[in-house]
């Protein structure tokens, strides 16, 4: 029997650390934003702290996946990690908002590579039969980072410095880098790819121009100025060039023929709009809690737990329901409806709103977000051919990230413009000398202001947040309308439907075959083998327990020492009592007949599970079928308590 590689533990531990710091950095910053803006100055540029990271990571993600296939995941992973750590160190040492934004972009370049390469690297070191178990642990890392990110960010701000939200990455990342260098030796076989450099460059330039337009327009430059017109022209030219480049590219980063698939086109549009509403509005919740309600960064992290809890509940719970029913359309519809309700509730916040009421609004919004975000990925995976599974998955994720990159500066501009006019109209007098309420407001500063000015500022700020959440609600309404156009295609009862219960994770396997193998391997997980053998017995009409069936197969294959190795004496006695095995541990004619029925049932079941993948047309899929069958043969199914199905 194949033994598990003893190095998997250290390697996987290092990969989990890498994934944790990369995913954590998307949430840990939120509760520190008011303090960062107050320390460095430049509240009008606050959105860029988030946008710069997201935009850079969005561009890097498709490039890192292909570079990993071509040059090896180890060098790509190490380069991405080193870039991320460099960006983290520079962010922690930043002395101005412009510096921080530039360094966040460097950090995002590394972070995007880490997210995709870490998950692809699992396929290099984890045996297929165990990959489902390890993928579940990766999903847990994402869930953990979602919950502890705001808490950890608040703790560092209150007890150390906001700079530690970046410095904390360095010791963790260095440990992971050392471990990976010592023990991570992925296979040397590489898949040659033609990287779509032109497409990636045009997409990056077009997105950057759009983000600059939405960030600077109406704030630094008038909407009808030469500068905004130039940015608009650059974005249109680059995106048009991107469409032309994708038609000619040998391996386009986003194949245009995917948009002929109605499900992909619709879900991509929904994901894009949801990304705008999600990142564009949720970014400003800590500002309300800290600047309006006076909560400390740590406390504001705790007060945002309802949002994170809602996301986890609906993501995991919805996935479980989908995996049982095979139907999904109701979830994005209900999810976007709850998003609308949550945004409208947040738009009613006032200075006197209790934390409990705000928490209820966040819970509703979180339940909506969790019900739509990862379900869209599952819907796309169910709708495309296996040959496009990997690129369709990354494409769906790309549109959501694009929405976030564009939405965050839009909402930032709305907040800044409204706050400026509100402060000019409501302040009873000038603030104390040296105090800039528009660019340097922090919880401590607001608390130290004279009561009339403090009350006026809080009222002006919460009023400036109302159009932010109302705009988010408008985008959520658009997403709600679009979800009704998603065709209802029941999930096929094949490996394409597997993983529905894991929708809280982020499926980013490096290729379609890796995606298929991971899903097929999850069928052979230790916790499912007992059920597989029970169903096999029902299909074949053989009255044998799972471990008895497994032993019957092994005896037929003349595997030496199998009874002693797995302590199967009771099962061997049972087979002899039924007349299937003789005293010399050889199958009797009755045993041969039972074995033939079981083999036929096993073959039919595996073929049915993979029928949608047209295995007769693809040798790779036939090989996966063989590995799936072999993985079921390597160890007997675990015994379960009597009466457990």
Image: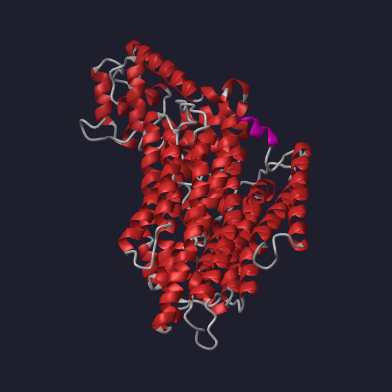
Magenta residue check for 258: yes
Residue 210: give x, y in percent of width and height: 68, 55
Q: Nearer the viewer, residue 333 or 571?
A: 333
In the rendered image, the residue lying farthest to the bottom is 433
**Residue 465 as seen in the image, left or right of residue 623:** left
**Residue 591 as seen in the image, left or right of residue 170:** left
Residue at point 62%, 62% (across, down): 52
Decide if residue 444 is in sight here: no
Residue at point 64%, 55% (across, down): 76
Q: Is residue 89 above or below residue 518?
A: below
Image quarter in which the N terminus is found? top left
Residue at point 24%, 24% (across, down): 573
Q: Is residue 559 above or below residue 593?
A: below
Residue 258: give x, y in percent of width and height: 64, 34
Q: Is residue 618 above or below residue 201?
A: above
* Count of residue discs: 0
Tell me the magenta residue range.
Answer: 256-261
Q: Is residue 366 above or below residue 317?
A: below
The main secondary structure of the magenta stretch is: helix
Residue 225 sits in quarter:
bottom right
Magenta residue check for 365: no
Decide if residue 192 is in sight here: yes
Q: Nearer the viewer, residue 383 or 438?
A: 438
Q: Nearer the viewer, residue 233 or 260?
A: 233
Which color mode does the image show?
Answer: secondary structure
Image quarter in which the C terminus is found? top left
Residue 138: give x, y in percent of width and height: 46, 50
**Residue 82 as seen in the image, left or right of residue 337:** right
In the rendered image, the residue lying farthest to the left is 642
Residue 640: give x, y in percent of width and height: 26, 35
């Amino acid at each position: 029997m194949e033994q598990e590689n003893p190095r998997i533990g250290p390697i996987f531990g290092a990969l989990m650390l890498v994934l944790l710091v990369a995913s954590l950095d998307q949430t840990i910053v939120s509760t520190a934003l008011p303090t960062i803006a107050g320390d460095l100055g430049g509240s009008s540029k606050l959105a860029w702290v988030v946008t710069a990271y997201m935009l850079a990571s969005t561009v890097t993600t498709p490039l890192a996946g292909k570079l990993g296939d071509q040059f090896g995941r180890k060098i790509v992973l190490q380069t991405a990690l080193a870039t991320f750590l460099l960006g983290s160190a520079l962010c922690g040492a930043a002395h101005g908002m412009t510096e921080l934004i530039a360094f966040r972009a460097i950090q995002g370049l590394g972070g995007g590579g880490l997210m995709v390469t870490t998950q692809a690297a699992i396929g290099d070191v984890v045996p297929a039969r165990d990959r489902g178990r390890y993928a579940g642990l990766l999903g847990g890392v994402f869930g953990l980072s979602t919950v502890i990110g705001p808490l950890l960010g608040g703790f560092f701000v209150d007890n150390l410095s906001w700079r530690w939200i970046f410095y904390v990455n360095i010791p963790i990342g260095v440990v992971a880098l050392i471990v990976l260098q010592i023990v991570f030796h992925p296979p040397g076989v590489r898949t040659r790819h033609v990287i779509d450099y032109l497409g990636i460059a045009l997409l990056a330039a077009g997105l950057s121009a759009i983000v600059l337009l939405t960030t600077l327009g109406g704030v630094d430059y008038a909407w009808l100025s030469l500068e905004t017109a130039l940015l608009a022209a650059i974005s249109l030219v680059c995106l048009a060039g991107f469409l032309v480049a994708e038609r000619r590219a040998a391996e386009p980063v986003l194949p245009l023929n995917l948009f002929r698939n109605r499900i992909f086109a619709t879900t991509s549009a929904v994901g894009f709009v949801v990304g705008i509403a999600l990142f564009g509005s949720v970014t400003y919740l800590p500002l309300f809690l800290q600047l309006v309600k006076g909560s400390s960064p740590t406390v504001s992290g705790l007060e945002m737990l309802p949002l994170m809890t809602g996301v986890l509940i609906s993501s995991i719970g919805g996935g479980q329901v989908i995996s049982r029913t095979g139907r999904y359309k109701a979830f994005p519809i209900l999810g976007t409806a709850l998003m609308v309700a949550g945004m409208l509730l947040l738009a009613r916040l006032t200075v006197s709103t209790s934390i409990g009421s705000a928490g209820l609004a966040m819970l509703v919004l979180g339940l909506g977000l969790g019900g739509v975000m990862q379900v869209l990925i599952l819907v796309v995976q169910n709708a495309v051919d296996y040959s496009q599974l990997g690129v369709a998955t990354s494409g769906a994720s790309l549109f959501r990230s694009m929405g976030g990159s564009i939405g965050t500066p839009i909402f930032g501009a709305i907040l800044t413009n409204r706050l400026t006019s509100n402060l000019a109209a409501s302040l009873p007098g000038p603030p104390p000398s040296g105090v800039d309420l528009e660019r340097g407001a922090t919880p401590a500063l607001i608390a130290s202001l004279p009561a009339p000015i403090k009350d006026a500022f809080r009222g002006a700020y919460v009023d400036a947040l109302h159009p932010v959440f109302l705009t988010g609600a408008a985008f959520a309404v658009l997403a709600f309308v679009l979800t009704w156009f998603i065709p209802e295609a029941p999930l096929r009862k094949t490996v394409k439907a597997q993983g529905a219960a894991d929708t809280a994770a982020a499926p980013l396997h490096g290729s379609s075959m890796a995606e298929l193998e991971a899903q097929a391997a999850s069928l052979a997980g230790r916790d499912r083998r007992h059920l597989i053998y029970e169903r096999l017995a029902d299909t074949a009409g053989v009255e044998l327990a799972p471990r008895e069936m497994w032993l019957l197969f092994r005896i037929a294959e003349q595997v030496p020492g199998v009874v002693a190795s797995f302590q199967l004496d009771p099962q061997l006695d049972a087979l002899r009592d039924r007349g299937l095995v003789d005293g010399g541990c050889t199958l009797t004619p009755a045993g041969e007949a039972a074995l033939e029925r079981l083999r036929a049932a096993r073959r039919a079941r595996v073929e049915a599970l993979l029928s949608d993948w047209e295995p007769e047309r693809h040798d790779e899929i036939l090989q996966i079928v063989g590995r799936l069958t072999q993985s079921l043969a390597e160890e007997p199914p675990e015994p379960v308590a009597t009466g457990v199905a």
